[in-house]
Image (tube, grey):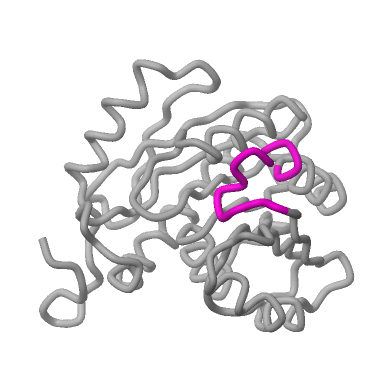
Amino acid sequence: MRCGVLPGGAAEASDYAREKKWADEVLPGLVVGDPVYLQTPRGHHKFLSLFAPADSGKAAIVVHGLGIHPDWGMIGTLRTELADRGFATLSIQMPILAADAKSEDYPPTFPEAAERIAEAVGFLKAKGYQQIAIVSHSMGSRMSLAYMTGKPDPAVKSWASLGISVGDYQALKLPVLDLYGDNDLPPVLANAGKRKQSLATGDSKQVMIPRADHFFTGHEAEMVTAVADFLNATLK
């Protein structure tokens, strides 16, 4: 399947067969949280989300990167560890393309990605959560930027953006955490100064974790602490 814009300029759809394959692998081993299937307004597809509730009234939507699933590696660590720290978490399956797709093939999926984030916000609000943050990584941060620069719900109070490679935060008026490792990918490092300069609110900040790579391998504890501290400061 070649990726890109479909005839007539329509956005590229996710590879739903790959999504089902990921779900079939994830769900038998699920320990923390419960599976929830959400549906975008287009109504063509229900997508897997993993929900771990909390009594705090605060919640985080966890958005994974390119071609993976909502319990993968550091994403699974974020969703479970933040839940342990008192935040409800909803980790959502984002659009994925064929296994050989490159990052430049993904922008046509961003409209669907933004819809999925909006549905996740609606789900959490229906559960009573009015203080919501987005916690995203890599391609998931680019997808989240598409949502945040559209018409984000007022219940979304802050955004923890991990390992984003392109763009800036100039258009955003809510607190942003720009988190990356000092051994991150070259595009992430090259754009760090521009991203820092674009942070607009007093609660926004950029944090670099020493010796960490793009996936914070071996530095997951520092990653979770940086995100949790930011959420505690911005979700009241």
Quarter occupied by residue 84: top right
Looking at this view, is 82 or 153 the one in front? 82
* Quarter of the N terminus within the rendering: bottom left
Tell me: residue 229, above or below residue 89.
below
Q: Residue at x 21, y 43 (%)?
A: 18
Tell me: residue 128, above or below residue 206.
above
- Tell me where the magenta segment starts and ends, as one range: 211-223
Residue 5 place in picture, x, y as percent: 20, 76
Quarter occupied by residue 52: top right
Q: Is residue 104 left or right of residue 139?
A: left
Q: Residue at x 70, y 64 (%)?
A: 178
Q: Is residue 182 magenta?
A: no
Looking at this view, is 132 or 233 the one in front? 233
Tell me: residue 64, above or below residue 5.
above
Residue 136 place in picture, x, y as percent: 57, 54
Q: Is residue 73 left or right of residue 56?
A: left
Quarter occupied by residue 88: top right
Residue 7 is at least partly visible in this image: yes
Total count of labels: 0
Residue 150 is at least partly visible in this image: no
Q: Residue at x 74, y 54 (%)?
A: 209
Q: Is residue 215 magenta?
A: yes
Residue 185 place in picture, x, y as percent: 53, 65
Residue 159 place in picture, x, y as percent: 68, 59
Q: Is residue 139 left or right of residue 219?
A: left
Q: Residue at x 77, y 29 (%)?
A: 85
Q: Is residue 183 left or right of residue 87?
A: left
